[in-house]
Amino acid sequence: MTSENKLTHNWEDPLFFDRRLSEDEVIIRNMTRNYCTEKLMPRVQTAYNEERFDRDIYTEMGELGLLGSMVNERYGGIGLAMLYMAWWLEKWKELTVGIDQ
């Protein structure tokens, strides 16, 4: 393998998953990531610290298509692949693990 073909390890994407995404998949992934880090995280932390349930979070996630994303369009969903739900759950896990620290 020549030095120009040598792959280096990427801790953010160790399996080079991002290289396989379509343009639409990148848009959805980025939207989910941005929503979680910019809008959702501060609200989740506040709700946790105040020991309350913020119903508006779930309403907003539904409007963004994050809830029921795998539901077929004929039943009112947006019919996305399981992959999108996996991104969403992964981001949710990042937000909630260790939130009380």
Image (tube, rainbow, N blue to C red):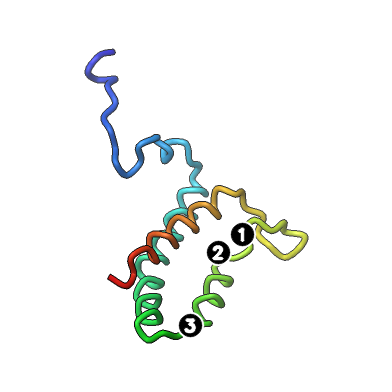
Q: Tell me the amino acid under the disc marked 1.
A: Ser
Label 1: few (<14), some or many (≥20) within 10 Å?
many
- Mark 3 — residue? 54
State the CA–CA distance, disc 2 to disc 1.
6 Å
Q: Position of residue 78 (x, y in %)?
A: 65, 59
Badge 3 marks a residue whose secondary structure is loop
Quadrant position of residue 68:
bottom right
Q: Position of residue 91 (x, y in %)?
A: 43, 58
- The mark closer to the camera, 2 or 3, is 3
Label 3: few (<14), some or many (≥20) within 10 Å?
few
Examine the rendered structure and indicate whether residue 58 appears above or below residue 67: below
The outermost residue toward the top is 1
Discs 2, 1 touching: Cβ within 8 Å: yes
Label 2: few (<14), some or many (≥20) within 10 Å?
many
What numbered label is drawn on residue 66?
A: 2
Q: Tell me the amino acid under the disc marked 2.
A: Leu
